Image (cartoon, rainbow, N blue to C red):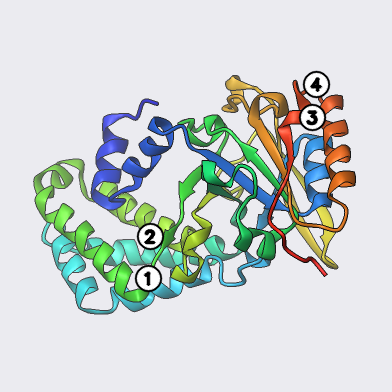
Amino acid sequence: MEIDEATRKFNEIFNPGLLEETFAVLKEQKRFVYYTSSDTAMKLLRNQELWFRNATVMNDFSEVSYGLELIQSVFSGPEGKRFREAVEGIFPDTISKADALLSEWERDWRLETYIACVSVHDRSEDQRGRLSMWRAYGDIALVVNNTPMIAVTDLLAVYSVPVLYLSERELTGYLSNITDNILINRSYLADLGQSVLVTYIHNMLFRFAIATKHPGFREENEWRLYYRPTERQSPMMKKEAVVLNRVPQIVHKLQLTNDPENGLYGADIPSLLERIIVGPNEYPYVSYGAFVDILTDLKVEDAHNKVVVSDIPLRTS
């Protein structure tokens, strides 16, 4: 995984900890897991596509809104003032330019961000899954390798980022680290010019907005895949109007295939899927057989060993 120097420096200053978390996925060969319903899992596998839904209809009703509200609260406080002073000390009027840009894009961030959510999967969960996720998201867990998640490319126009689980106090501390980094790298940022600094602040705020959740969700250990069609179109996305949970809505469907020319690396089902965990339900043997059958149809090797039944003794009704 190679990252250019400008990207590395931006993240070190404005996204402390992000590169370390990303490289840890590589070094420790971490996998990801997608908890969902049996119906959705079947459709994903058969159609070989992952659906990205509008952030306003996700399970956590405060997606995006929580981050934006946190920004307003923290940046109006003492640490926000210190941040503004550090930035204005490099280029006067930078904050007003960043505020104007935020005002221009805030509504679009809320309404035109499409998301798919996965969690980091621990090896201790291979046989049972995660109880809290079964209770919240469905009865099937698709465990996948990390190759598509850590590919660094703009070709696909789909990006992944680990979620920040922050309270107001925690974001204040996180912002303090960023301000310290700005002060340390003052000369470097000055050499880049004001327009670049405004863009960097805008990108920092964007991550806070679309990838910050209440700390009560921390055990999910989520990474967020996001797509912003109003900013950039993806050649691998198919837009479609559907009805889900009785709500008419637009979804964007990402084709799961191996297509490096368009930014997809090892995303075909046989390469991507590491295992399926059938969650607690009334008919685990029947569910097991159905998923073995569909994997066999997809030419997934050793299909009967890639589907396991969770051993958590949870009643589902």
Q: Quadrant of residue 47?
A: top right
Q: Amino acid at mark 2?
A: Leu
Q: Is residue 90 left or right of residue 49?
A: left
N-terminal of the two: label 1 or label 2? Answer: 1
Name the residue beneath numbered marker 4: 299
Question: Residue shown at 20%/78% (left/top)?
Answer: 78
Contact (CB < 8 A) between labels 1 and 3?
no
Distance CA(mark 1)–CA(mark 3): 48 Å
Contact (CB < 8 A) between labels 4 and 2?
no
Q: Amino acid at mark 3?
A: His
Location of residue 137 in the rendering, given as x and y in whole percent from the top left corner: 69, 60
Question: Residue shown at 52%/71% (left/top)?
Answer: 65
Question: Residue shown at 88%/53% (left/top)?
Answer: 283
**Dot 4, crowdedness within 10 Å: few (<14), some or many (≥20)?**
few
N-terminal of the two: label 4 or label 3? Answer: 4
Name the residue beneath numbered marker 1: 71
Contact (CB < 8 A) between labels 4 and 3?
no
Location of residue 172 in the rendering, given as x and y in whole percent from the top left corner: 27, 70
Looking at the rendered structure, the secondary structure element under dot 2 is: helix
Distance CA(mark 2)–CA(mark 3): 46 Å
Contact (CB < 8 A) between labels 1 and 2?
yes
In the image, residue 110 sits, relative to residue 12, either above or below, namely below
Q: Amino acid at mark 4?
A: Lys
Name the residue beneath numbered marker 2: 205
Residue 304 circle label: 3
Q: Nearer the viewer, residue 271 or 160?
A: 271
